Amino acid sequence: MFGLAMFYDLQSFGQHVTDSNIPIRLTLDEAIRRARETEVTYRGALTDAALAREDRNQARDALLPSVAYNNSYIYTQGTGDPAVVRFIANNAVHEYVSQGNVHETLDLAAIADWRRASATAAAAHARAEIAARGLVVTVVQAYYGAAAAQQKLDAARNAADEGQRFLKLTQDLEKGGEVAHSDVIKAELQENDRLRQLQESKLAALSSRLDLSVLVFQDFNDNYDISDDLHAEVSLPNVEEVKRLAAQQNPDIRAAIETLKAAGHEVTASKAGYLPSLSLDYFYGIDATHFATKTNGVSNLGSSAVATLNIPIWNWGATQSRVRQAELQRDQAKRELSLAQRKLLAELQSLYAEAETASMELGSLSRSAELSKESLRLTTLRYKNGEATVLEVVDAQTTSTTADFAYQDGAARYRLALANLQTLTGVLTTP
């Protein structure tokens, strides 16, 4: 029964999201915005950052005076004399306590905890920024992957149409006695290859669209159109500008720095265990034998103040052990910061070189696609005039399709390389 209910729920869900015939116009910016609302890992990073902020607020509030109102009733066994009780710590057989209490603790550890929580919150915010930039890369890869798959599907359709036209041409030439039947066989084999390639391209395009749909839509929806800006001209930013932005805005470095700060404050908090702490309490209210502000005309309201100095003497080395733990964590945070700095320098060179290479290759791939199409046209004309063989035409068709596919992949690669640079600079280069 549960399986059938789930099946019908999924069926109705699919019917709900496919009823509309108006496709959504999905730009890259819109895809990123939608993904930020739905992507689980990114939302988890935001949740962690929000939790860290609340920890910081709680640590800050712990430094401020607190106010409470205490009410209690104490019954103590008497001795027969109403003024004398059996327990000397208690004041009467019936004692009512109703007092407001203002409490404040002066402790170096609490101050260090607040600073540690502040640094931890800053580190969590930086990690949320890392997740945001990583999400942009993921969306760019899926978005332009789907765009490239659609372009390759169009190229596959053109190749299939070209295969059919060439098969028709060889058949007509065979009827006129101009070519052998082997040319027709070769053309038919080529057409079959192009049709299979078309089917594979349809499957790849569908798969890429579904991957993008899962990433950006809260409800499953594959009824959308992608803005065709895959081949829009986008210039590669200057390497010096990339270095400057990476040095100022890299979240990995910020996260490592704040983590080191938090570890340093943890060391301070641990060492505070060696120092005294002072707590102050002020009470105002009643502590009387009757629950009343006056008894026999005498006011029960009064106040008292208590100052307590707690001096640590001996705890079997627990404080020393906590200090060693904190120092080990601080040393590890230093090593992680050094690693993050080295990785930034390496990634900066690697990712910029990747983007630069993709940019240079994209122009070559575009030119190759144009030349291969022109070569196919000329080779087909030469074949009609009896100046080229069927193998030359087939080879030209294959070269044209391969060059077109490589051009689409090259354009998607360049867009992904630019998005990877964004993980270092925080600036997404768009048309």
Image: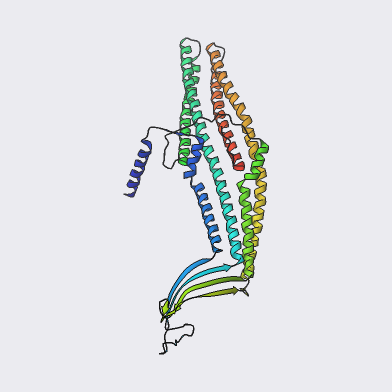
* Screen quadrant of the C terminus: top right
Q: Residue 90: give x, y in percent of width and height.
A: 47, 82
Q: Nearer the viewer, residue 365 or 81?
A: 81
Q: Nearer the viewer, residue 250 or 277?
A: 277
Q: Residue 259: give x, y in percent of width and height.
A: 61, 55
Q: How is the image coloured?
A: rainbow
Q: Nearer the viewer, residue 431 or 163?
A: 431
Q: Is residue 107 visible?
A: yes
User: Eyeballing the image, is 271 above or below 366?
Assistant: below
Q: Residue 9: give x, y in percent of width and height.
A: 34, 44
* Outermost left residue: 1
Q: Residue 372: give x, y in percent of width and height.
A: 57, 22
* Outermost front residue: 297
In which quarter of the view is residue 289 placed?
bottom left
In which quarter of the view is residue 119 placed?
bottom right
- For the point 51% across and 47% down, the residue is 42
Q: Is residue 404 left or right of residue 12?
A: right
Q: Is residue 189 visible?
A: no
User: Eyeballing the image, is 264 above or below 253?
Assistant: below
- For the point 52% across and 39% down, the residue is 139
Q: Is residue 362 left or right of residue 156?
A: right
- For the point 56% across and 46% down, the residue is 129
User: Eyeballing the image, is 410 above or below 172?
Assistant: below
In which quarter of the view is residue 311 placed?
bottom right
